[in-house]
Image (cartoon, rainbow, N blue to C red):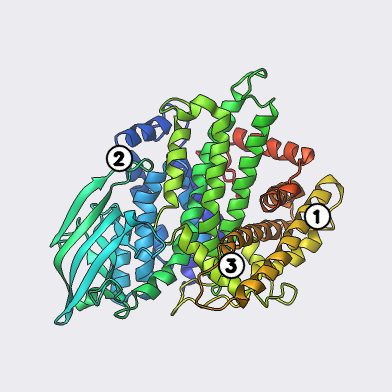
């Protein structure tokens, strides 16, 4: 449990101060005199390496402490805070965010989940001293072969002999510690076990070979290469958890990694929108790319709306680990399934505004093409789209008899991004299956609040909410039909379309929940304009006939886009001051 003394790290004031410190250290990305500016990151990307000055900055900041639980001397207490801190890094360079940060975090969560006291202490000491970790998660059957994991650990005496190869691993060469999943029965379908193994950059990293580096289109600064083991001796103390518990360990880790990784990536999309706004502002009124053209205004507003939708999903997903542990695996799958599509489509639409400049490799707009290349790579990895969809489809089978009106709605804290009072997140034992659905249950309550808003925006908000509730009724009826099919038969392709619909309804419920629980406050999140725009956009994805133009909503949203650009604030729920 977190100690009272360490609670100071988790207060909202402390979180904002920490983020402000990191943003100030990075400085203005567009300042040509900044040694951590866009041109320097682009030059490092062209050389396929991380920017050394940025790595040194993160060393001084102690970024690794964000991955270490407070009871072990670090600053990790809330997953939404972890994502907010890392957005400052992803805003500059996704490769830096992945190679320096997310990779070590993804490895460490396995140790925090079921490591021995000694393993947890040693891992904490390694990270707090600035060490790096890497992890070879098992790739599910629906995964991709690029990330295939073919490792075996044959019992030998009191320990194991590790053999085989992992085809592609991020930051493997610089890791002092590795978390590996291997088949302990030696067969392709054998049980998986997890091991904490010395990395190539450790004095104990023997009997392993680094495979040639694999070049990638995006995140060029990340060093992606494979590892090959040939009878690497593992002492019994290297086993994490019980023998054969690797699959369950990975399942426990996925809600933590799915939710945070996609939430961090909003920093990339933020930079794309900011770059496009600068481009539009620089053009005269007669230009097709200027703010005077409807196409440009719509593209900026739609992208901003999509970022807010994505952050609402990210918020409920990261906070569900604390508040709805039985549903965090499901919501993590929704985020992994939906957000890459939404964010990549938003960046594509912005590229149309930039035109030929979207391909620029240097200069004022060079950052855009780098972001467009990097963003799709963040969603690549184990537990990808297909496996996330499988989690959603399994939940749809359980919704056959679900009654949203009788379900227990989500707690208010799930929707409050500045609420720091959350319970601990460590999950003991297997992740339970979701019996209810708090987001769907909250939709009805939020719909009643939406119906009470007057005026043009209130009408649009009510209409879009009505589309969501009608789509939910249709979905639940389809779930009953799906569950009636004999078990053991292949899942109907119709279930995949149902997964799409479910993810969008959850996104709508998340947006409504955030707006509803800020309605009595002041500021942007209390304004029905963003909620109306978000719900209308989601309704249009569910039913094209429900798409509509909201002149007043677009006007207010565009004003917010330009205000945040001028005031150097982020395009997410937090409106964080950046580069100060």
> Which residue is drawn at the image coordinates 72% and 49% (left, top)?
536
Q: Secondary structure at mark 1?
A: helix
Residue 343: which disc?
Answer: none
Horizontal side of 137 relative to 355 (left or right) equals left
Q: In the picture provided, is 293 more to the left or to the right than 282?
A: right
Residue drawn at 72 percent across, 61 percent down:
471
Q: Which residue is mark 1?
A: 462
Residue 17, percent from left and from top:
52, 51
Of the numbered discs 2 and 3, the one sitting upstream in the chain is 2
Asked whether the viewer can see residue 411, the reply is no
What is the C-alpha distance between the residues marked 2 and 3?
A: 39 Å
In the image, which is nearer the foreground, mark 1 or mark 2? 1
Residue 4 coordinates in the image, percent (x, y): 49, 71
Rendered residue at 63%/19% (across/down): 287
Q: Judging from the image, what secondary structure is the residue with disc 2 in?
A: loop
Q: Which residue is mark 3?
A: 421
Query: Mark 1 and mark 2: span between their CA atoms?
Result: 50 Å
Task: State the residue at coordinates (44%, 25%).
Answer: 363
Labels in figure, total: 3
Residue 453's quadrant in the figure?
bottom right
In this rendering, would 382 be left or right of 542? left
Seen from the viewer's position, the closer of residues 60 and 168 is: 168
Q: Give the mark, 3 or 1, whose residue is nearer the N terminus.
A: 3
Structural crowding at the residue carrying mark 3, measured as other residues with C-alpha within 10 Å and reported as few (<14), some (14–19) or many (≥20): few
Q: Residue furthest right?
A: 454
Query: Residue beneath label 2, please?
Result: 49
Q: Secondary structure at mark 3?
A: loop
């Amino acid at each position: 449990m977190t100690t009272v003394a360490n609670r100071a790290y988790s207060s909202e004031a402390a979180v904002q101060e920490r983020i402000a410190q990191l943003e100030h250290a990075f400085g203005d990305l567009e300042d040509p005199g900044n040694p951590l500016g866009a041109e320097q990151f682009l030059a490092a990307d062209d050389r396929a390496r991380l920017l050394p000055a940025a790595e040194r900055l993160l060393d001084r900041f102690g970024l690794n402490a964000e991955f270490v639980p407070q009871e072990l001397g670090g600053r990790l207490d809330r997953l939404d805070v972890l994502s907010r801190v890392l957005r400052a890094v992803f805003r500059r360079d996704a490769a830096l965010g992945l190679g320096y940060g997310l990779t070590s975090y993804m490895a460490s969560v396995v140790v925090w989940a079921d490591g021995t006291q000694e393993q947890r202490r040693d891992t904490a000491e390694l990270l707090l001293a600035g060490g790096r970790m890497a992890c070879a998660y098992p790739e599910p059957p629906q995964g991709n072969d690029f990330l295939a994991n073919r490792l075996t650990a044959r019992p030998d005496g009191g320990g194991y002999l590790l053999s085989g190869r992992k085809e592609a691993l991020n930051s493997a060469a610089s890791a002092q510690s590795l978390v590996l999943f291997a088949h302990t029965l030696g067969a392709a379908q054998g049980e998986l076990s997890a091991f904490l193994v010395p990395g190539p950059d450790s004095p104990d990293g023997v009997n392993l070979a680094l495979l040639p580096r694999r070049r990638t289109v995006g995140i060029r600064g990340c060093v992606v290469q494979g590892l090959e083991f040939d009878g690497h001796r593992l002492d019994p103390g290297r086993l994490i958890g019980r023998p054969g518990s690797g699959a369950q360990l990975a399942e426990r880790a996925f809600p933590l990694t799915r939710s945070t990784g996609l939430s961090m990536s909003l920093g990339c999309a933020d930079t794309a929108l900011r770059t496009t706004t600068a481009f539009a502002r620089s053009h005269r009124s007669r230009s097709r790319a200027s703010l005077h053209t409807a196409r440009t205004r719509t593209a900026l507003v739609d992208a901003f709306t999509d970022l807010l939708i994505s952050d609402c999903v990210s918020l409920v997903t990261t906070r569900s680990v604390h508040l709805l542990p039985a549903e965090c695996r499901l919501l993590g799958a929704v985020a992994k399934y939906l957000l890459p599509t939404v964010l990549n489509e938003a960046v594509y639409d912005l590229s149309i505004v930039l035109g030929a400049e979207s391909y620029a490799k240097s200069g004022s707009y060079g950052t855009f093409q780098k972001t467009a290349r990097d963003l799709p790579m963040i969603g690549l990895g184990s537990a990808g789209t297909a496996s996330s969809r499988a989690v959603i489809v399994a939940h749809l089978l359980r919704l056959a008899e679900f009654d949203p009106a009788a379900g227990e709605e989500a707690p208010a804290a799930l929707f409050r991004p500045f609420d720091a009072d959350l319970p601990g997140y460590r999950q003991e034992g297997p992740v339970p299956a979701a019996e209810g659905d708090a987001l769907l249950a909250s939709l009805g309550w939020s719909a009643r609040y939406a119906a009470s808003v007057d005026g043009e925006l209130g009408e649009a908000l009510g209409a879009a909410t009505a589309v969501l509730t009608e789509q939910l009724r249709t979905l639940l009826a389809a779930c009953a039909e799906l569950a009636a099919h004999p078990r053991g038969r292949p899942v109907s392709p119709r279930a995949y379309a149902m997964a799409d619909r479910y993810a969008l309804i959850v996104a709508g419920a998340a947006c409504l929940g955030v707006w509803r629980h800020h309605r009595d406050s002041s500021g942007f999140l209390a304004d029905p304009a963003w909620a109306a725009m978000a719900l209308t956009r989601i309704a249009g994805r569910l039913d094209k006939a429900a798409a509509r133009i909201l002149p007043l909503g677009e006007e207010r949203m565009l004003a917010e886009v330009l205000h945040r650009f001028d005031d150097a604030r982020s395009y997410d729920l937090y409106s964080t001051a950046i580069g100060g």
